[in-house]
Image: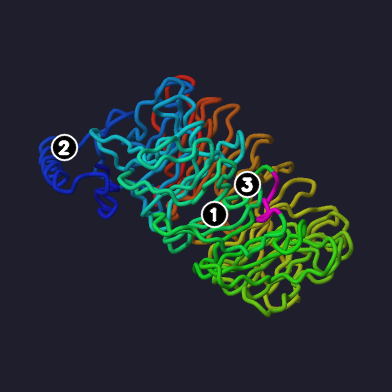
């Protein structure tokens, strides 16, 4: 048992163990630990002895071909890499762990793998603090075909998600026949299971062999699940809501009759559909050609389907809603559409109920102009959006309150040929960070109601350098980012204060040819984890450092020759 679990005692997993047996075994374990100075951990790492000091970084879960080259397994690292536990069980020949997600409470990990049969991808749940005598639990029903549905072919992402309260995990899969109530083989249905695998429920109500569930989303309150399916009519994709345990038949909440093909796919081929719960679970929003075939409008619905207003106000003709997002406080819904000008995509906000008039937020767009991206501030006070207002194909960043069209150009001072490519609000809503594509890719931060921006470079930036990716710290004090600031084409990890008063290299000294790839802030702001071939070229390992670059630590332990860390996430 790791130092972290001793300190965070509420994280100890008991859900997969019989409580009476657990108490007895745990007592024996404590006696053994007291007599022998520490407990071992199963799997890779050999169960390194516990350290006396408190770990700097929280635990982390990662996938790697750590034990066998080109066989990807799942691991958890505790005590800054001093204790590593293999979470996935022995894999069938050719098998791999392809994706994992940690439960919101930090107790379990759900993962998809062809663990028992090559190319049959099933869903398993395991405790983060897996003991040596425990095994992962297969929580998916018996599956056929390739098992759990991939969001898009070759994406490496699969349809499974934890409920916000960690009580269940839902998934879309191709079920085999289940006695005594056989399912229809060769169609994708929606299921949910408890983490112990004792309860496995069918959530969707598909009755035909030509129907499938295409996408789903948990209600924020964790009681219900919304899903898109051609459940009643072939190739007519409607929105349904069902209890997570499937005890009450699903109900259609998109309006009927559905004239067109139904809920719109966000981008063709992605497998992601344009619907979302309000954060307070009060309503669902969705885009569909519900009233006129081929004309996609924005609707909201109560979870029981009794109230189903159209909240966009599109005129006649080829006008469509492109995208929408709920305000974090659920009071408003913003969307983009060519509602005012046929050849311009504006930003609007409206109340999510019947009888309201949308407010245009992106004032001044000309023909050919487009709002390409928009995001609510976490506190719902404003929206930021990127637009080429003149239709000249150069995109700038603006901020606006959701009740008027007095938008502010907050990327002011950039060259006319510069584009804002991506932006992110700080978690406390005080600032926005964004990347500009000019002569180089550069990083700036700004207050959402000011025109002046601060370039994030510090004293480390070389003349010809680019910023590739960035993210805010959870406490909004710093921005971490990858850049080739010191040596051209050598990508390292840095962090800076939001006002550029301090810049530090977070990644350790890289070997020749080394680069940092993925990175992620720890939930407690203790540091930044990242994957890099830092010590050996072309060997990607998992490291973490404090935000100022100190205490650089290898978290993934030793890898087999040819092994690499592929993905990771911090345990909350």
Where residue 469 is drawn, which disc sits there? 3
The residue most toward the bottom is: 355
Separation of residues labelled 2 and 1 (CA atoms): 51 Å
The residue lying at 65 percent from left, 54 percent from top is 456
Q: On screen, 107 above or below 298?
A: above
In the rendered view, does 251 fall on the left or right side of 268? left
SS type, badge 1: strand
Where residue 227 is drawn, which disc sits there? 1
Q: Which residues are magenta?
A: 261-268
SS type, badge 2: loop
Look at discs 1 and 3 and give the one toward the viewer.
1
- How many residues crowd mark 3 within 10 Å: few (<14), some (14–19), many (20+)? some
The residue lying at 69 percent from left, 48 percent from top is 267
Residue 503 visible in the shown view:
no
Q: Do the residues under discs 1 and 3 have CB atoms within 8 angstroms? A: no
Separation of residues labelled 2 and 3 (CA atoms): 44 Å
Identify which residue, 215 or 250, lies in the foreground. 250
Badge 1 or badge 3: first in the primary sequence: 1
Residue 54 visible in the shown view:
yes
- How many residues crowd mark 1 within 10 Å: few (<14), some (14–19), many (20+)? many
State the residue position of label 2.
37
Q: Is residue 78 magenta?
A: no
**Colouring rule applied to residues:** rainbow
């Amino acid at each position: 048992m790791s130092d972290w679990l001793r300190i965070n005692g509420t994280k100890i997993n008991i859900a997969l163990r019989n409580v009476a047996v657990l108490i007895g075994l745990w007592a024996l374990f404590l006696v053994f630990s007291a007599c022998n100075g520490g407990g071992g951990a199963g799997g890779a790492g050999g169960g390194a002895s516990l350290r006396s000091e408190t770990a700097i970084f929280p635990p982390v879960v990662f996938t790697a071909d750590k034990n066998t080259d080109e066989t990807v397994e799942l691991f958890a690292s505790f005590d800054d890499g001093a204790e590593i536990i293999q979470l996935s069980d022995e894999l069938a020949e050719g098998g791999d762990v392809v994706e994992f997600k940690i439960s919101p409470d930090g107790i379990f990990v759900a993962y998809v793998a062809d663990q028992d049969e090559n190319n049959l991808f099933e869903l398993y749940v395991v405790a983060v603090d897996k003991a040596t005598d425990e095994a992962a639990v297969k929580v998916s029903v018996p599956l056929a075909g390739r098992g759990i549905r991939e969001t898009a072919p070759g994406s490496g992402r699969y349809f499974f998600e934890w409920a916000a309260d960690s009580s269940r995990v839902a998934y879309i899969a191709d079920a085999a026949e289940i006695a005594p109530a056989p399912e229809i083989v060769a169609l994708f249905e929606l299921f949910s299971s408890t983490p112990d695998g004792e309860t496995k429920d069918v959530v969707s109500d598909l009755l035909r062999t030509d129907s499938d569930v295409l996408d789903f989303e948990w209600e924020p309150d964790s009681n219900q699940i919304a899903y898109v399916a051609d459940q009643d009519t072939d190739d007519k994709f409607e929105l349904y809501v069902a209890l997570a345990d499937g005890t009450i038949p699903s109900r259609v909440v998109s309006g009927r009759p559905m004239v067109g093909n139904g809920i719109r796919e966000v981008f063709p081929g992605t497998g992601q559909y344009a619907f979302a719960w309000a954060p307070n679970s009060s309503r669902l929003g969705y885009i569909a050609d519900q009233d006129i075939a081929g004309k996609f409008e924005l609707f909201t619905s109560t979870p029981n389907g009794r109230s189903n207003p159209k909240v966009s106000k599109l005129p006649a003709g080829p006008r469509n809603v492109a995208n929408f997002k709920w305000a974090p406080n659920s009071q408003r819904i913003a969307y983009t559409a060519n509602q005012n000008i046929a050849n311009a995509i504006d930003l609007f906000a409206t109340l999510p109920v019947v009888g309201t008039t949308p407010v245009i937020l992106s004032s001044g767009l000309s023909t050919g102009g487009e709002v390409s991206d928009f995001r609510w501030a976490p506190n719902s006070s404003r929206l930021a959006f990127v637009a080429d207002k003149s239709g000249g194909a150069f995109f700038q960043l603006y901020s606006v309150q959701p009740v008027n069209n007095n938008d502010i150009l907050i990327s002011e001072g950039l060259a006319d040929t510069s584009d804002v490519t991506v932006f992110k609000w700080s978690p406390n809503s005080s600032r926005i960070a964004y990347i500009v594509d000019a002569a180089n890719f550069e990083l700036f931060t700004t207050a959402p109601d000011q025109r002046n921006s601060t370039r994030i470079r510090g004293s480390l930036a070389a003349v010809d350098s680019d910023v590739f990716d960035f993210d805010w710290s959870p406490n909004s004090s710093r921005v971490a980012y990858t850049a080739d600031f010191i040596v051209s084409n050598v990508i390292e990890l840095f962090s800076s204060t939001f006002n550029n008063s301090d810049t530090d290299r977070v990644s350790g000294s890289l070997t020749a040819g080394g680069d940092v790839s993925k990175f992620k802030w720890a939930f407690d702001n203790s540091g930044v984890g990242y994957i890099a071939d830092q010590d050996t070229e072309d060997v990607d390992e998992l490291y973490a450092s404090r935000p100022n670059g100190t205490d650089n630590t290898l978290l993934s332990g030793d890898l087999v020759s040819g092994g690499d860390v592929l993905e990771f996430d911090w345990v909350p």
